[in-house]
Image (cartoon, coloured by chain):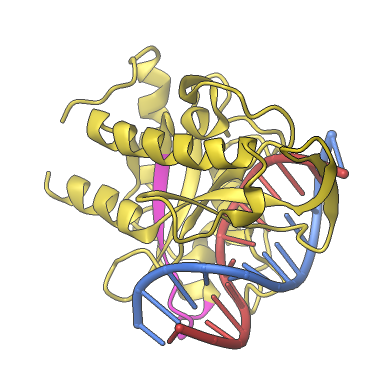
Chain colours: A yellow, B blue, C red
Amino acid sequence: MFLSHEITDLTDEQEVLAKAQKFAGLTLDEVAARLNWAVPKNLYHARGWVGNLLETALGAKASTRPIPDFPQLGIEIKTLPLKQNSQPKESTFVCTLPLGDLNTLWEQSRVYYKLNRVLWIPVEAENYIPISKRRIGMPLLWSPTLKQQEILKSDWEELIEMASLGKLSEITSHQGVYLQIRPTANNRASYKKMSEDGNYISACYKGFYLRCIFTRAILSSYYMY
DNA sequence: TAGTGATCATTT
DNA sequence: AAATGATCACTA
């Protein structure tokens, strides 16, 4: 398969992948034990716990900055919750919609930057499986194919155009083939935003998400090999 | 039951 | 306040 990214630091990248591969087959409590982490009974008050656990276990720096988990390598780590049939259970959060200037090129966008290189780590996520006993799957180091990039780009351009025209409130999650814009955390808070007519309007925080059909395709394309 | 809209915790 | 890590829960 042709990957559109440039290979710059394959050695270190392969080291991260190799490290992640060693977690495949382990349960979450086995990884948590190595870090001396307690396993929560449920994820209601611990959303993001699985992602933080695996990032930490892989040696990524915990950060809330809008940059990849491994800044030097440009690798983003994403856990992928799986249903019993091994298909993605949830859409995947990518990044927030910038609050300021939206007049950027696709190649300069947060979405492009985030998805350029992703280490996907599938994890069992059916509710009947206790958190501690959920198993980690084989990781996949991925970059979008040219075809995938084309669709992501057109989704992004359509959504960004609406947002930049002051039509943020008209954007719905139904738009976008692979990429959608949805409300995100901090939704009780609002901020002031300049609308098309030059007046300030109140708006809620939004974020870009990848639809399950897309992450499902990523998984299946790798299982072919 | 898939998908949308709502929500939780933490860090800087 | 706004970014990270996402999952919850209702409804069509």
In this rendering, is residue A110 above or below A169? above
- Residue A19 shows in the view: no
Furthest toward the top, the residue is A8
Q: Does A199 appear in magenta?
A: no
Q: Position of residue A206 (x, y in %)?
A: 65, 51
Q: Which residue is drawn at 58% across and 34% down?
A: A69
Residue A132 shows in the view: yes
Q: Considering the image in quadrants, where does the N terminus of chain A appear?
A: top left
Q: Where is residue A81 in the image (x, y as percent from the top left)?
A: 44, 63
- Residue drawn at (58%, 24%), measured in percent from left and top? A71
Tell me where the magenta segment starts and ends, as one range. Answer: A119-130
Task: Count numbered badges in the picture.
Answer: 0
What residue lies at 41% left-to-right and 40% top-to-bottom? A119
Q: Residue at x 37, y 60 (%)?
A: A212
Q: In this view, does A86 lie above or below A140?
A: below
Q: Which residue lies furthest to the left in this view?
A: A224
Whether B2 is drawn above or below A127: the answer is above
Which quadrant of the structure image shows residue A46? Answer: bottom right
Tell which of A219 and A101 is nearer to you. Answer: A101
Q: A77 or A88, which is in the foreground?
A: A88
Position in image of residue A174 (x %, y %): 45, 61
Q: Picture quarter containing residue A49?
A: bottom right
Q: Is A128 within the magenta?
A: yes
Instruction: State the quadrant of the C terminus of chain A.
Output: top left
Picture layout, residue A144 above or below residue A138? above
